[in-house]
Amino acid sequence: MSWRNSDGAWQFYKDGTLHRHSTGLARGHRIRAGGSLVLGQEQDSIGGGFSSSQSFQGSLTNVNVWYYVLSASSINVMSKSCLSGTGNVYKWSDFIYGVKGKTAVVIPSPCYPLSSWG
């Protein structure tokens, strides 16, 4: 997923392929520091209101967050290799510390050797 605040342009990619896109999403909005990032669960209120019927079932790997929009070609290349990019806001290994609920965590990650998990 990518989003640009200047015009609200967003793109959703799955396995490196663009699936949906549009503009106007929260145009001009700035994400403030001090929040939390929730993966795999819809929330009904900030940081809460979780329902198991609204949870993601599947696998996530190599989730990274950058403070800028990556090009479509970069996203495509990164989708094909675990070692092709590390986010500058969050990197994949950062997410291990906040895992909650009935989540299976595979360590070492198939993407990184055990030593990179701290």
Image (spheres, rainbow, N blue to C red):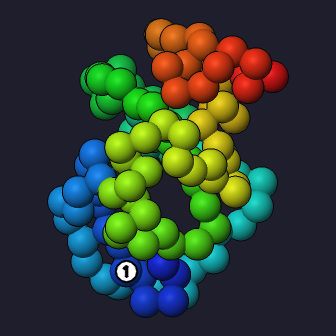
Report the residue marked by disc 1.
Answer: 9
> From what the image shows, is residue 9 above or below residue 110?
below
> Looking at numbered disc 1 in the image, what kind of residue is underneath it?
Ala
Q: Is residue 40 visible?
A: yes
Classed neighbour count for the residue bearing mark 1: other residues with Cα under 10 Å, few (<14), some (14–19), many (≥20): some
Quadrant in the rendering for residue 58: top left
For this rendering, which residue is in front, 108 or 20? Answer: 108
Q: Position of residue 9 (x, y in %)?
A: 37, 80
Q: Position of residue 29 (x, y in %)?
A: 56, 80
Looking at the image, the residue that sits furthest to the right is 118
**Number of marks in the rendered image:** 1
Quadrant in the rendering for residue 53: top left
Q: In the shown orientation, is residue 9 left or right of residue 118? A: left
For this rendering, which residue is in front, 88 or 58? Answer: 88
Which residue is depicted at the point 43% across and 64% down? 74
Q: In the shown orientation, is residue 82 left or right of residue 46? A: left
Quarter of the image that includes the N terminus: bottom left
Q: Is residue 55 visible?
A: no
Which residue is depicted at the point 46% across and 85% down? 27
Quarter of the image that includes the C terminus: top right
Which residue is depicted at the point 60% across and 25% down? 112
Q: Position of residue 43 (x, y in %)?
A: 45, 40
> From what the image shows, is residue 71 above or below residue 46?
below
Q: Position of residue 50 (x, y in %)?
A: 45, 30
Which residue is depicted at the point 60% across and 37% down? 92
Does dot 1 land on a helix, a strand or a loop? strand
